[in-house]
Amino acid sequence: MLRIGPSGNSNSFYDQGHKHTKEAAEWLNGMGLNAYEYSFGRGVRIGAEAAAEIASEFKKYGIEISSHAPYYTNFANPDDEMIAKSIDYVRQTIIAENAFGGLRTVFHPASCGKADRREAVGRAKANIGKLIESLSDIGFDFILCPETMGKLNQIGTVDEILDFCTLDDRLYPCFDFGHINSYTKGGIKGYDDYKRIIDKTADKLGDKKASAFHVHFSKIMYGDKGELKHLTFEDEKYGPEYEGLARVIDEYRISPYIICESDGTQAEDALRMKRMHSAYAV
């Protein structure tokens, strides 16, 4: 069964009078969605009581929850103290995600800064290895998902993410297809492009990860340096379009975890995505 849902809460959630994320579980269930991503983009700040309430409601309504680590992780930073901070941001998110009753934590790998890209990618890979080693004391299961990035100076192409995910069995790729489309300046045209990425994943990481990778999806405006801003499915200029990905997923009978990141209409667009799949998948 596919898991499809939004990142955070749509504008309509608040317009209808809802105020708290714990209310999103019943709301999403009523729409027919079954996934949700909680973003700790500006820092991991949630109390034990609030996390327990969210966990209880999401379990009650069968909504699986993932989390996004703070956006400013950078595993290519040459400063060891900053690497330690990035490791701690991810650790805090994993612990919060476990409190939610979930498994998956997404994180941004790195940016090049002023360094040569090859050097920066090598440093990022080594430090992601240190991240994994540093989490050896955690006594519960978790999945870490390094994300493809949308700006040219960021580290996180498809090939870079796949290479990072060879480091450990708990590293699964997060393919943000809007980001991929942005850094390739419209390179995702349809079915064949999605199929090529998923086939490459199977070749590099094996069928298990190629059938259960993480997805971020939205249409994104891009420019010469890549990503500019997230859009809604009403946009007809930038893309990418979801139909081709839905077709590959259905044909391969795989079950990635799919999160919609549209700007303000993420739940509504997630429902549109769900309806593009064949009956078996949803």
Image: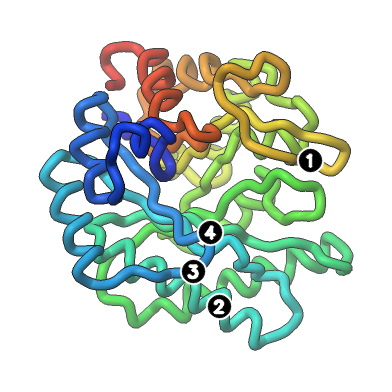
Quarter containing the N terminus? top left
From mark 3 to mark 1, how far is it between C-alphas? 25 Å
Element carrying mark 1: strand
Q: Which residue is mark 1?
A: 226
Say which label, 3 or 1, has the lower sequence index.
3
Which one is in front in this view, the residue at disc 3 or the one at disc 1?
3
Q: For the point 43% across and 21% down, which residue is it? A: 273
Q: For the point 28% across and 38% down, which residue is it? A: 17
- Residue 248 horizontal/vertical position (percent): 49, 19
Residue 163 location, quadrant: bottom right
Question: In the image, which disc is placed on residue 130?
Answer: 2
Say which label, 4 or 2, has the lower sequence index.
4
Say which label, 4 or 3, has the lower sequence index.
3
From what the image shows, is residue 121 above or below residue 268?
below
From mark 4 to mark 2, how far is it between C-alphas? 15 Å
Q: Which residue is mark 4?
A: 107
Which one is in front in this view, the residue at disc 2 or the one at disc 1?
1
Q: For the point 34% across and 82% down, which residue is it? A: 137
Q: Is residue 65 visible?
A: yes
Quarter containing the C terminus? top left
Q: State if disc 3 and disc 4 touch (CB < 8 Å).
A: no
Give, as a three-letter code, the residue at label 2.
Lys
Residue 26 location, quadrant: top left
- Residue 70 horizontal/vertical position (percent): 53, 64
Question: In the image, which disc is placed on residue 43?
Answer: 3
- Residue 55 horizontal/vertical position (percent): 20, 56
From mark 4 to mark 1, how far is it between C-alphas? 19 Å
Q: State if disc 1 and disc 4 touch (CB < 8 Å).
A: no
